[in-house]
Image: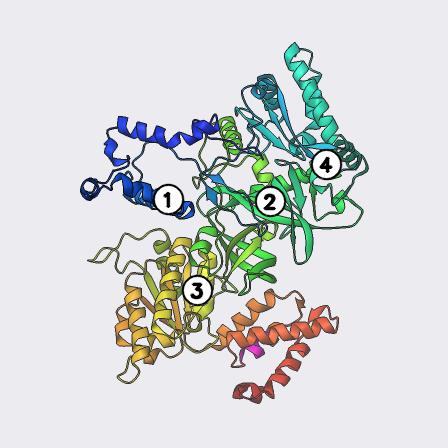
Amino acid sequence: MPICWPNGLRPRSKKAVAGSDEAAAEKLSTSGSSATDIKEVESPKDDSTKTDSKSDDDKDKAKDESGEDKDKDKDGEDKKEDDEKKEKKVLAPVGSISSAKNIYKSTVDDDGNWTWVDKYPEDAEEAAENEETATYAVLVRNIKSNDSRKKLEAHSIIVQSPWLKTALGTVLADYPGVACELKRLEFEAPFQPFVHRWHEFVKYMDKPDLEATAKEHLVLLHDILKYEIGESIKAFEDYVRNGVVTFEHLWMIFQPGAIVLAQHKGPLSAFELTESEYMANQCGKFLQLRVDCVDYGGKTFGRFQESININEFIGAKKITGLNVYPWAFHEDKDKLTATLTKRGEIFEKLAGHHYKSYSGKAVTWDREGNEIQIQVSGRIIVDIESFNRFSPYRVRYLNDWNAKDLERLSKYKEHYGGAPDDDGTTRLTPYHQMIARCRTRGYSLKMKKWLDFFVEDVSEVVWNTEAFDKLVLPTDQKELIMAFSESQLGGSNFDDVISGKGKGIICLLSGPPGVGKTLTAEAVAENLRVPLHTLSSGDLGSDPWEVERGLSSILELVARWNAILLLDECDVFLEARSNHDLERNKVVSIFLRTLEYYEGIMFMTTNRVENIDAAFQSRIHVSLEYPDLTSASRRQIWTNFLKGTYIKSGLTNQDINELGELKLNGRQIKNVLKTAQLLAGHRKSPLLERKFIDTVLDIEKKRPGAPQMLAHYL
């Protein structure tokens, strides 16, 4: 196997290798090191060798001894002398020689073991690529072919011709992973760039203004590629013509940088393909496509990569029948482009945080991170930044724009005069809108969950402008509530002695159930057109640390969303502290401290106002007592609910007056009308008549705990 030597390290001959140590020593001596550090040190001679010399007779006698013994003694002395020399050799300090030492891989034994040695391999051959081969336009590395039709096949091709590099710079422009400006331009089999851009390559060869050398080199490369991938190109053209493909050649129809379509984690969406790779797992083989879509990370837009797999299949399969296929094979590309671009515009407008309405499927996650679709309806907050901060689910980290994206965005910005967006984010081009994600993340106010919402199911909020007018309260109370709510949302300048303290508005609504406490907060939110975040004691937990963490997060979110906070049935937080329940005392203390620095609008409801801790009295700005409903109030509630039924009312004024005498609260009146309406619909009655209400009331009379007035009336 040829060995590539680093510059300056390749030995010219075995003799040069043998003399490497001497050269190193000479170089060290010239660099300032003492020569005595590396030469052998001779030991001083023993004086006994001078005085104990033998006579000539003794020498002759020694010569007469056995030659075998003499040879053994000589070998032993030589070995001993060599060992002494090795022990006495002084080496240079570690890492001090200004040279490089080459070592080589040894031969492999039968067990497959090898090590590194300093002996130059005798069977090493000169490298195939040298100054001479660099003069050729193209180098083809060949290996033995497994194809019975070929003896050899190309392992890789190295393009060295500057004319070819110029041509390929145009033909393979924007092809991922190819940089034609490199000095060494290498392509490995199966030469995917040329298969994907074969038509562009052939078209470039037909240009009439090509230089003679460029034309000659292009023909040379064309002939090489035709031999190597000619069959693949024919198969690719046949697949495109018939709209089918086999799993073996599936990679051919997926060109990096092209747009692909897939119903991946939602409706049909467009993605930009970055690369494809054949892989396998326990379930079998598959082609994995790595694709990019445009996403929003909470502050800026960017790219997010998804992986889509196509499992192995037998025979030919229709391209549009795959779970992901190239955009070019779609039957109505123009209509699809318009649809995807319009959806991308909605996605772009949802950047930041927005109060919206939603009806449709949404996505949540189980403990293992698997997606689960659930049905959601009601008001939502689209807020990816808050999702990343406060939700327990995984954050999507985005990649930066690539060079081509920046070029597109820059040109598009110049086209629109460079006007900045309202939220400071980048204005997306139609191309980026087309490949935008089909889902966005936020919070469901009704379900109190962080979810992934489908963009197409997000709609504008339909406000109930009559809700506050229908609120059955004295006029002066309604005016007071609206006055402080509007002033607070408009930005109150009133502050405490300590900056940032006591800037919020807290309203306590107390009274029996069903008299309109919760409805008051809902009506105010509708009238001001702001979100209403409803919170109960069960949402915060019971442990002090849970309450503190949950309450801090919610108050921060409410301030960010400019929402109204409704703390329903807040008895656990407001109840007077005692000397016996220290844990609950901690909860009350945390709640008291948090209220001091709350800057928004908070409504708190309770039906046990007499048990409120004294410390809360000074922190509550407005306290409203809701008395039991009067006959006039109940008649007004009956009238309001009858206007909202989908079956036309058949009740007379006398019927409403009689029903108003029943001591029912607002919630009970609503439930009776809802049930009567269902009964009328079941009997296909065009009117909601009195008999249906009486039937429901008759059933209610038998329910345990029914109001005494209701039983007496019936």
Which residue is the site of mark 1? 64
Main SS of residues in magenta: helix
| Label whose residue precedes the other's in the sequence (4 or 1) | 1
Disc 1 residue crowd, few under 14, some 14–19, many 20+, Cα 10 Å = few
Mark 4 or mark 3, which is nearer to you?
Answer: 4
Residue at numbered disc 3: 521
How packed mark 2 is, by other alpha carbons closer than 10 Å (few <14, some 14-19, many 20 or more), is some
Mark 1 falls on what kind of element?
A: loop
Which residue matches tag 2? 290
Of circles 1 and 2, the one toward us is 1
Does the residue at mark 2 contact the one at mark 3 (Cβ under 8 Å)?
no
Residue that numbered label 4 is attached to:
145
Q: Residue 270's spot in the image, x, y percent? A: 63, 42
Q: Is residue 659 magenta?
A: yes
Tag 3: amino acid: Ala
Between residues 641 and 287, which one lies in front from this camera angle? 287
**What colouring style does the render use?**
rainbow
Query: Residue 507's x, y, as percent?
Result: 35, 66
Q: Which image quarter is the C terminus in?
A: bottom right
Q: Percent position (x, y) of residue 468?
A: 47, 61
Q: Residues within 10 Å of mark 4 (few under 14, many from 20)?
A: few
Q: Nearer the N terminus, badge 2 or badge 3?
A: 2
Checking the image for residue 706, the label placed there is none
Task: Name the image quarter holding residue 498.
Answer: bottom left
Q: Which residues are magenta?
A: 656-661
Q: Which amino acid type corresponds to the residue marked 4 in the rendered image? A: Ser
